[in-house]
Every structure is written in C-alpha cells, then in structure tokens.
C-alpha cells in the first residue's frame, strides 16, 4: 500500500515483531476470537495489514479496558495501539488521524424530562459512564454542570445506571441500541455529543514510524480498505473517518 522505509520498520518493530495493543472491550472493533486465541475483528485485521506491509510478524497484546492500554505505553509493552485518540492520552502517545468514527449519545428513562442532548448538562443530572473510555474523557472536558458517575466497564456502567436510577447513561450508540432493549420504556437521545475517533497510536519519539502510520491510515481510508474491513466483519455503527 505504501513504500516502506527501513528506518520506519526499525522504529515500529525493532525486534522484527510488531506488538499491536488491542482494546478487547471495544465490541465493534473486536468481534471474536480466532482458534489460536488471537482477537478477531476490524482492529486486529488492520494491525495485521500493517505488519504485513512492514514485512514483520504480528503479536497481539490484549487489554480489557482502554485506560489500561493507554497506561501501558510507558512500560514499553506495545509498538502500536489501536485506541481512540484523546488529548489526555497524547502525552506519551502520538496518534494518527482517525480511521473510523463511532457516535456517542445518551440513554434515558422513557419518562425522563431530558428530551435532547443539550438538556443533559444541568445541575443535579447524574450520568453513568464507563471510566476512562474516550467518551468519558470527552465529557470530563466539556460538561459544566452534570455529574459523571463512573463504573469500571460497559456492562458495569449499564448496571450502575439501572441500580442507582441515574438520569442518563453515556455510551457508544451501537451499544446503547442493545441496552435500550433491556429496559422497559427507555429511549436514546437523537444526535450525538461526540464521535469517538478510533486511531492508531505509537509511543512518542518514533518520528519515522509515526509518519509511516499516518500515511498508512490515510491510504487505508482512500483505498477502501477500512470500508472493506467494516463490511467483512458486518459491523453496524461504524463509519469511515474523513480524510485528514
């Protein structure tokens, strides 16, 4: 897809093996497991395509939560990480432009006075959210009045919303479409408060490797590779991100 330079190859896979960090909690990008135990889905396939272009082996490093993946960058445990790009994560990680976008919105009870996304950010409103998810980080920066109540994971944030009878559940729209069927008389607010930008990161300080990844992502979008991967895995709720 892109001509490879030896400098970029040495930076991204200095051992000859590309260690790709995968957020196993993202059910849109990781849709299963292969017979050998490797993750299956769009994100693992994209990482494998990069390794193939680099002419190196691929090794997957799985994390159960995105925050754990981001934290591990300082431990030199991965070479590329497929994770949402967020300013809070950019201190130690250089991010490409997004390759896919995922809409994020709110679920509320059917009798809630909250009718639109703009109504959520009010004093006294309590929002269940998966801690350190990309949309948690976004809301932490932008909400001025509402309170975020965090849980460790997607399932846990849903349980928290139901158990504590909170005012709203923040989440990725595809997941909320599933959750809304589990609660009688619940509804999803129209529109989105953000679109999570799923990108590829690499530890800061690998300039040639980072340049290569940026070019690779843009080529993967324009060539139709990302659209092909979305179709291959039958994922709904993802859209190819705009070109940089």
Image (cartoon, rainbow, N blue to C red):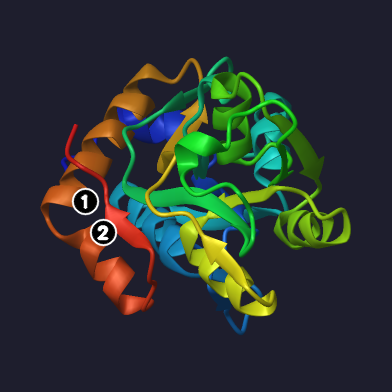
Decide: is 125 above or below 41: above
**Residue name at image x 57 percent, y 20 percent:** 141
List the single residue furthest toward the left. Answer: 223
Q: Quadrant of residue 33?
A: bottom right
Residue at which label 2 appears: 226
Q: Position of residue 226 (x, y in %)?
A: 26, 59
**Residue name at image x 62 percent, y 56 percent:** 108
**Residue name at image x 69 percent, y 74 percent:** 183
Q: Nearer the viewer, residue 142 or 41?
A: 142
Q: Quadrant of residue 98?
A: top left
Task: Report crowding for label 1: few under 14, some 14 to 19, many 20 or more residues within 10 A (C-alpha).
Answer: many
Residue at which label 1 appears: 220
Decide: is 169 above or below 84: below
Q: Position of residue 171 (x, y in %)?
A: 58, 52
Q: Give me the C-alpha separation between circle 1 and circle 2.
A: 6 Å
Decide: is 22 above or below 124: below
Q: Position of residue 48 (x, y in %)?
A: 41, 59
Q: Nearer the viewer, residue 61 or 163?
A: 163
Tell whether 218 sits left or right of 52. left
Q: Quadrant of the C terminus?
A: top left
Secondary structure beneath label 2: helix
Q: Earlier in the sequence, mark 1 or mark 2?
A: 1
Decide: is 66 above or below 233: above
Tell whether 215 sits left or right of 16. left
Q: Residue 18: which numbered mark, if any?
A: none
Q: Are marks 1 and 2 in contact (CB under 8 Å)?
A: yes
**Residue name at image x 81 percent, y 48 percent:** 152
């Amino acid at each position: 897809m892109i001509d490879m330079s030896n400098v970029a190859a040495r930076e991204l896979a200095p051992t000859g093996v590309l260690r790709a960090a995968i957020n196993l909690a993202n059910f849109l990008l990781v849709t299963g497991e292969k017979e050998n135990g490797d993750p299956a889905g769009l994100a693992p396939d994209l990482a494998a395509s990069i390794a193939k272009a680099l002419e190196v082996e691929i090794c997957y490093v799985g994390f159960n939560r995105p925050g754990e993946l981001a934290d591990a960058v300082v431990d030199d445990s991965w070479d590329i990480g497929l994770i949402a790009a967020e300013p809070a994560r950019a201190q130690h990680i250089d991010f490409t432009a997004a390759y896919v976008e995922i809409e994020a919105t709110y679920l509320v009870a059917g009798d809630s006075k909250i009718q639109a996304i703009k109504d959520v950010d009010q004093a006294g409103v309590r929002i269940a959210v998966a801690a350190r998810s990309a949309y948690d980080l976004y809301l932490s920066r932008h909400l001025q009045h509402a309170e975020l109540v965090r849980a460790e994971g997607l399932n846990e944030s849903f349980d928290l919303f139901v158990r504590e009878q909170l005012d709203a559940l923040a989440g990725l729209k595809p997941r909320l479409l599933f959750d809304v069927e589990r609660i009688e008389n619940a509804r999803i607010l129209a529109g989105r408060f953000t679109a999570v930008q799923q990108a590829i990161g690499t530890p800061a300080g690998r300039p040639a490797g980072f340049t290569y990844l940026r070019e690779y992502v843009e080529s993967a979008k324009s060539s139709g590779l990302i659209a092909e991967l979305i179709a291959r895995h039958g994922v709904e709720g993802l859209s190819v991100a705009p070109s940089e």
